[in-house]
Image: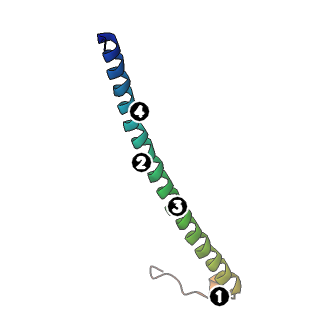
Amino acid sequence: MSDDLIRRLADLESRIAFQEHHLEELSDALADARATEARNALLLHRLTEDLRQLRLTLASAPVTGDGGAEPPPPHY
C-alpha cells in the first residue's frame, strides 16, 4: 500500500473511534435524561395525588371557629 493510502486509512480509523466515543457519551446522556424525566414524572404524579387528597380533605371538613373565638396570643 502507498503511504498516502495508509495515512488516509489511519485518519478514517481515528475519525470512527472519535465518533464512537461521542456516540457513547450521547447515549449515556440520553439515558440519564430519560431516568431524570421518569423520576420527575413520578414525583409530579405523587404531588398531584397529595394535592387532590388535601383538596378533598379541606372540602369535606366543616369550617369551624371564628377568629374572635380564639384565645388571644400570650403576649396580650
Tell me the amino acid under the disc marked 4: Gln
| Dot 1 crowding, Cα within 10 Å, few <14, some 14–19, many 20+ | few
Pointer 1: what residue? Answer: 65
Q: Position of residue 57 (x, y in %)?
A: 64, 84
Determine the CA span between mark 4 and mark 3. 28 Å
Q: Earlier in the sequence, mark 3 or mark 1?
A: 3
Q: Earlier in the sequence, mark 2 or mark 4?
A: 4
Tell me the amino acid under the disc marked 3: Ala
Q: Classify the position of the N terminus by image quarter.
A: top left
Residue positioned most to the left: 3
Q: Are marks 2 and 4 in contact (CB under 8 Å)?
A: no
Name which residue lies at 54% across and 87% down: 71
User: Which one is in front in this view, the residue at disc 2 or the one at disc 1?
Assistant: 2
Give me the disc on residue 38: 3
Determine the CA span between mark 2 and mark 1. 57 Å
Q: Where 32 falls versus 16 (above or below)?
A: below
User: Which one is in front in this view, the residue at disc 4 or the one at disc 3?
Assistant: 4
Q: Earlier in the sequence, mark 3 or mark 2?
A: 2
Q: Earlier in the sequence, mark 4 or mark 3?
A: 4
Assign a secondary structure to mark 4: helix
Determine the CA span between mark 4 and mark 1. 70 Å
Q: Position of residue 43 (x, y in %)?
A: 53, 66
User: Which one is in front in this view, the residue at disc 3 or the one at disc 1?
Assistant: 3
As drawn, is 69 to the left or to the right of 7? right
Give me the disc on residue 19: 4
Tally of marks: 4
Pointer 2: what residue? Answer: 28
User: Which one is in front in this view, the residue at disc 3 or the one at disc 2?
Assistant: 2
